[in-house]
Image: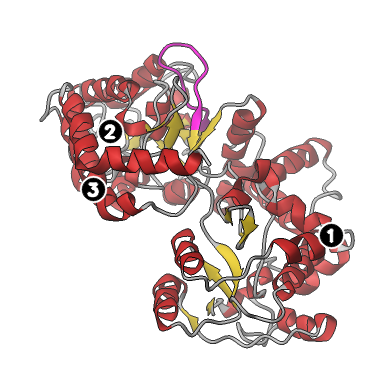
């Protein structure tokens, strides 16, 4: 079972089924790969659910946290504890067990390891504040340090004609109708500035785990956002626009600020490519009270590699992973990697299973920044050298490579994430497991209640005090049951 890999990412003549990786597995490991099915990437989970229901399971599988729980409950997945401890190389263990083994915790039940997490790290999804830096320069605005500074910048963007067309037609803060339930455009960074988090589980002062969106600090942030909307600093129609529609304003030179992920330059790069005067800069989230604030991180990647119960060679999974990380990141990777990943360094996607170094993008930014400073890229790996070369292309006039500068350059989103990491300014979702029974039956209703309530409050259609009613209703409609289950699981 595998998502089909675009042939343009593979070496000439290679396919998803038969490629440089599968040939090496057979030659070097004595492992022959045969896929039960290959489907388009967007159809993998649905196809996997059908496979699980049929009971006809492949030897090796990639599953979500929910699917893993189903397999464990049905006693259809192998305990990998012994083979992992026996066969995993130090390099594989370094990646799998990174960040205090947070990925491992999600696949370990009663001290038994039921899967190898495809753990990517805790940094890349933390919120970053993106602002049109050319507008800031034009209006003589300084980098924001507080929420009041942020609001002042948004106000200037609305009232001082930063696009220079003589019309009152520019926006401050971009939002979309999904609010905190979107991944590419969400206000979590704004709420974090009030020491509030949205949509995750955190420990309160009593040591109990609570749902962050119901905490009092959220009310303060909502009230401030309601005021911003009333003052015209937020698009009046944000509640009707999806992410793509919301970003149209940015690419039409009509909006200048949003909270988004580190890869946001891909979403606002259209205008940058057309107009060399346009630029966006990445900033850390700012504080409402001057005290240090924590940027929230969602639960880590939820996919894991597992082995069918009864398969006679469960160690095959570990050997395949050992092979991939060694070729790409081992002692001989300087010469071996390109054989497997090709000139575009994307051939790793042809591997049957793969794990990349957690938080590799932040490490890349550090290495690239040093190389730019010293003008010596000799220590960069293939991927990093690609970003380095593209940054130089951008600096020499190629606007299509702007995103490399703003994600991996000295003043970039990854530099912001590094700042969070180095100063212990991150807070992670404590609940990293499969949905509980009450979540399965109640969470959709509760999420809808949260989104509708928050949207109405921001619009001013509901009083800020309706937040208190939301908290009460959330508890009654299943929130209390979910909270009890979460605390039971996290107390083990």
Residue 236 position within the rendered picture, expressed as x and y whole percent measured from the top left = 18, 35
Q: Is residue 205 shown to the viewer in this render?
A: yes
Q: Nearer the viewer, mark 1 or mark 3?
A: 1
Q: Nearer the viewer, mark 2 or mark 3?
A: 3
Q: Which residue is mark 2?
A: 170
At 40% across and 47% down in the image, what residue appears? Answer: 183
The label on residue 330 is 1
Q: Disc 1 to disc 2, how far (Cα)? A: 51 Å
Instruction: Please name whichever residue, 344 or 322, is drawn nearer the observer in this view of the structure.
Output: 322
Tell me the crowding category of disc 2: few under 14, some 14 to 19, or many 20 or more residues within 10 angstroms, Cα based.
many
Q: Which residue is mark 3?
A: 241
Colouring: secondary structure
Disc 2 vs disc 3: Cβ atoms closer than 8 Å?
no
For residue 135, side relative to residue 343 (left or right): left
* Quadrant in the picture for residue 152: top left
Instruction: Please name whichever residue, 450 or 231, is drawn nearer the observer in this view of the structure.
Output: 450
The magenta segment is 282-295
Q: Disc 2 to disc 3, how far (Cα)? A: 17 Å
* Quadrant in the picture for residue 466: top left
For residue 339, side relative to residue 11 (left or right): right
For residue 25, side relative to residue 193 (left or right): right
Total number of numbered discs in the rendering: 3
At 35% across and 38% down in the image, what residue appears? Answer: 483
Is residue 306 found inside the magenta-colored segment of the image?
A: no
User: Which residue, as the protein is rendered here, is positioned at the far left?
Assistant: 461
Residue 207 position within the rendered picture, expressed as x and y whole percent measured from the top left = 47, 25
Can you say which quadrant of the picture contains the N terminus?
Answer: bottom right
**Chain-order first, disc 1 or disc 3:** 3
For residue 162, side relative to residue 141 (left or right): left
């Amino acid at each position: 079972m595998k998502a089909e890999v675009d042939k343009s990412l593979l070496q000439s003549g290679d396919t998803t089924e038969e490629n440089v990786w599968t040939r090496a597995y057979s030659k070097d490991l004595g492992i022959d790969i045969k896929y039960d099915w290959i489907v388009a990437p967007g159809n993998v989970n649905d196809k996997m659910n059908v496979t699980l229901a049929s009971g006809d399971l492949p030897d090796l599988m990639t599953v979500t946290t929910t699917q893993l729980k189903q397999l464990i409950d049905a006693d259809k997945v192998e305990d990998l504890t012994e083979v992992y401890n026996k066969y995993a190389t130090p390099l594989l263990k370094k990646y799998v067990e990174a960040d205090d083994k947070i990925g491992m915790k999600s696949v370990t039940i009663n001290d038994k390891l039921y899967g190898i997490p495809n753990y990517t790290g805790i940094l890349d999804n933390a919120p970053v504040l993106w602002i049109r830096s050319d507008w800031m320069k034009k209006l003589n605005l300084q980098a924001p340090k507080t929420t009041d500074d942020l609001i002042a910048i948004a106000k200037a963007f609305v009232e001082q004609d930063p696009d220079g067309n003589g019309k009152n037609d520019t926006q401050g803060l971009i939002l979309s109708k999904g609010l905190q339930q979107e991944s590419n455009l969400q206000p979590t960074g704004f709420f974090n500035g009030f020491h509030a988090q949205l949509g995750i589980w955190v420990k309160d002062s009593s040591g109990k785990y609570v749902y962050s969106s119901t905490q009092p600090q959220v009310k303060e942030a909502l009230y401030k956002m309601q005021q911003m909307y009333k003052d015209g600093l937020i698009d009046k129609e944000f509640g009707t626009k999806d992410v793509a529609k919301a970003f149209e304003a940015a690419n039409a030179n009509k909006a200048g600020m949003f909270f988004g992920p580190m890869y946001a330059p891909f979403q606002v790069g259209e205008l940058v490519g057309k107009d060399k005067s346009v630029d966006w800069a990445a900033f850390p989230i700012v504080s409402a009270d001057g005290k240090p604030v924590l940027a929230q991180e969602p639960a880590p990647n939820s996919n894991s590699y597992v082995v069918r119960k009864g398969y006679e060679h469960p160690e095959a999974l570990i050997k395949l992973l050992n092979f991939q990380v060694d070729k790409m990141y081992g002692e001989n990777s300087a010469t071996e990697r390109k054989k497997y990943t090709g000139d575009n360094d994307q051939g790793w996607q042809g591997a049957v299973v793969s794990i990349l170094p957690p938080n590799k993008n932040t490490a890349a930014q550090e290495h690239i920044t040093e190389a730019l400073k010293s003008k010596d890229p000799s220590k960069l790996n293939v991927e990093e050298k690609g970003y380095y070369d593209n940054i130089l292309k951008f600096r020499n006039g190629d606007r299509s490579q702007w995103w490399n500068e703003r994600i991996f350059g000295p003043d970039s989103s990854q530099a912001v994430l590094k700042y969070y990491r180095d100063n212990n300014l991150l807070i992670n979702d404590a609940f990293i497991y499969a949905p509980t029974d009450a979540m399965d039956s109640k969470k959709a209703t509760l999420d809808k209640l949260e989104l509708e309530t928050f949207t109405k409050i921001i619009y001013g259609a509901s009083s800020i005090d309706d937040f208190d009613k939301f908290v009460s209703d959330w508890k009654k409609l299943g929130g209390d049951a979910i909270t009890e289950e979460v605390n039971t699981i996290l107390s083990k």
